[in-house]
């Protein structure tokens, strides 16, 4: 079996290798834990063309950059946090999460309807309440039933969206808001290695 870091593209290999040397900042409990054995057993669409391989490599780089940007956002919370900067970084994570989810809809056909529905959150960020977001998108109240692997992919999109809602509701960035932002990014970084195993390899 090839190494999980294997790639024919040296740039992808080096980028992924470098990112994986970082220790995670922390993990939050997930309602959909997957063991290594569970991850290996997930049904995936095979990569059958050069174009699909190029897309796979592009998403691999994007996911690595997502982790780096998430850690930068966390680092920025330790000093004088700036709402504009946080919104810019969260917006970039949201955009990357959307592309990762689009790719996951191809690789994980069983997640297609679930992830498509989750993407509807993007149009609601300006007015959705935090309580509704939590109920409908974190706890899947507005989403169809799906296997646990779909939950991990969804979080690459939902957690940055939640950061944008937190800063929208408290532009002065009080202590509770900073704590909430930190928790959101910590949690999504706890999902990214599982996402990598699910949609890249």
Image (spheres, rainbow, N blue to C red):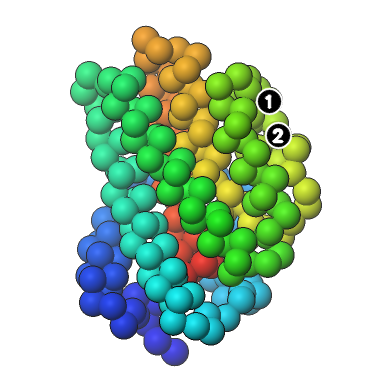
Residue drawn where x is 21% and y is 23% of the image: 79
Residue drawn where x is 33% and y is 20% of the image: 83
Query: In the rendered image of this protein, does residue 72 appear above or below residue 96?
Result: above
**Residue occupying the far front of the picture:** 51
Q: Nearer the viewer, residue 119 or 162?
A: 119
Image position of 109 (left or right of 171): right
Q: Position of residue 66 (x, y in %)?
A: 36, 50
Residue indicated by mark 2:
136
Residue drawn where x is 27% and y is 59% of the image: 19
Q: Secondary structure at mark 2?
A: helix
Q: Quadrant of residue 123?
A: top right
Q: Nearer the viewer, residue 78 or 76?
A: 76
Answer whether residue 174 is visible to the viewer in this image.
Answer: no
Q: Position of residue 37 (x, y in %)?
A: 58, 74
Instruction: Measure the alpha-carbon separation of dots 1 and 2.
Output: 6 Å
Circle 2 packing at 10 Å, graded few (<14), some (14-19), many (20+), is some
Image position of 137 (left or right of 13): right
Q: Nearer the viewer, residue 175 or 99?
A: 99
Answer whether residue 40 is visible to the viewer in this image.
Answer: yes
Q: Position of residue 48 (x, y in %)?
A: 53, 84
Query: In the rendered image of this protein, does residue 23 appear above or below residue 133?
Result: below
Q: Position of residue 18 (x, y in %)?
A: 23, 63
**Residue occupying the far top of the picture:** 172
Q: Quadrant of residue 139?
A: top right
Circle 1 packing at 10 Å, graded few (<14), some (14-19), many (20+), is few
Image position of 94 (left or right of 104): left
* Dot label at residue 132: 1
Q: Are marks 1 and 2 in contact (CB under 8 Å)?
A: yes
Query: In the rendered image of this protein, does residue 117 appear above or below residue 192?
Result: above
Q: Nearer the viewer, residue 39 or 35?
A: 39
**Residue occupying the far right of the picture:** 145
């Amino acid at each position: 079996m090839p190494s999980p870091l294997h790639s024919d593209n040296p740039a992808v290999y080096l980028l992924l290798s470098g990112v994986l040397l970082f220790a995670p900042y922390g993990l939050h409990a997930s309602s959909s834990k997957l063991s290594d054995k569970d991850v290996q057993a997930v049904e995936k669409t095979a990569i059958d063309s050069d174009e699909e391989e190029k897309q796979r490599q592009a998403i691999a780089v994007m996911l690595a950059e997502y982790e780096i940007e998430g850690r930068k956002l966390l680092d920025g919370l330790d000093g004088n946090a700036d709402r504009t900067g946080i919104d810019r970084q969260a917006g970039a994570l949201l955009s990357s999460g959307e592309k990762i989810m689009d790719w996951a809809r191809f690789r994980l056909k069983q997640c297609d309807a679930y992830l498509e529905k989750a993407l509807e959150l993007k149009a609601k960020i300006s007015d959705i309440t935090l309580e509704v977001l939590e109920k409908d998108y974190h706890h899947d109240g507005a989403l169809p039933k799906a296997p646990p692997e779909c939950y991990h992919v969804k979080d690459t999109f939902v957690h940055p969206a939640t950061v944008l809602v937190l800063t929208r509701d408290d532009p002065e960035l009080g202590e509770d808001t900073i704590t909430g932002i930190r928790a959101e990014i910590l949690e999504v970084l706890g999902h990214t290695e599982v996402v990598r195993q699910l949609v890249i390899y």
